[in-house]
Image: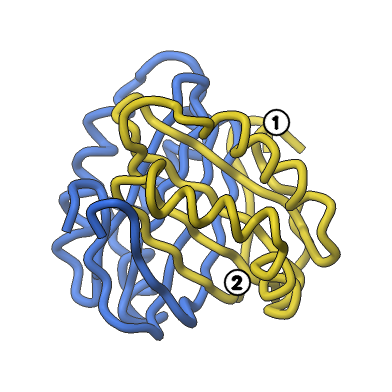
Chain colours: A yellow, B blue
Amino acid sequence: MHDGFAATPQPPYFAVIFTSLRSAGDAGYGATADRMMTLAAQQPGYLGVESVRGEDGLGITVSYWEDEAAIARWRKDAEHTLARERGRSAWYEHFELRVARVERAYGGGRTR
Amino acid sequence: MHDGFAATPQPPYFAVIFTSLRSAGDAGYGATADRMMTLAAQQPGYLGVESVRGEDGLGITVSYWEDEAAIARWRKDAEHTLARERGRSAWYEHFELRVARVERAYGGGRTR
């Protein structure tokens, strides 16, 4: 698999689509974001993540999960809960979070 | 709604998550990408789009649709079909496309 792509299994599985606009300044964001990526990857039912942030501060992170139960467990993680609070109050001007059930999927391109 | 976010309705609706790695050079990509954004927005059942590309060439575009029928119609559009062919053969080193049903959603942040 190419770098940056999640090696997800055959559907169905779940996607959490997190679109966010960062506020100015770091305020601890970078270190916590890295820590959350590491911690999420250790959760049962985690399948992978794809994440991009543009120069204008808009970012999309899609994490993939086996089922809704895995998403609910990760949501209850204490460190993650604290990080979300900081996100709401400091790091994000705005965010939208959507939980979706992936029904079908395929890949392609020059190098397939 | 903040710039860059799609003003989607209450779920359920559908998301097409398109993660891609651009190949080097433009080769007509920019103009076609702009045209496809304009054309998609004119389709019946289109709800919005969120799109980010990072400096490393990895991008995530999520388009939102009322139902699967709207996605299928857009897929059959002749100009879009030609553009997809160019994408496969020239513009993308690799891509992954996932069609998902959005089950729930919420927003937040400093400016809500």
Measuring from the top left, give residue A59's x and y in whole percent. 42, 41
Q: The C terminus of chain B appears in which quarter of the rendering? A: bottom left
In the image, B88 versus A94, the foreground residue is: A94
Measuring from the top left, give residue B33's x and y in whole percent. 28, 38
N-term-proximal mark, 2 vs 1 = 1
Chain letter for the residue marked with disc 2 in the picture: A
In the image, A89 versus A65, the foreground residue is: A89
- Please name the amino acid that badge 2 sits on: Val
Residue found 48% across the figure and 49% down from its top? A86
Q: The N terminus of chain B appears in which quarter of the rendering? A: bottom left
Secondary element under disc 2, as helix, strand or loop, is strand
Q: Is residue A63 above or below residue A33?
A: below
Residue A3, disc: 1
Residue found 57% across the figure and 50% down from its top? A83
Q: CA distance from mark 2 to mark 1?
A: 21 Å
Measuring from the top left, give residue A38's x and y in whole percent. 76, 41
Secondary element under disc 1, as helix, strand or loop, is loop
* B99 with respect to B51 (left or right): right
Chain letter for the residue marked with disc 1 in the picture: A
Badge 2 density bin: few <14, some 14–19, many ≥20, Cα 10 Å: many
Residue A102, disc: 2
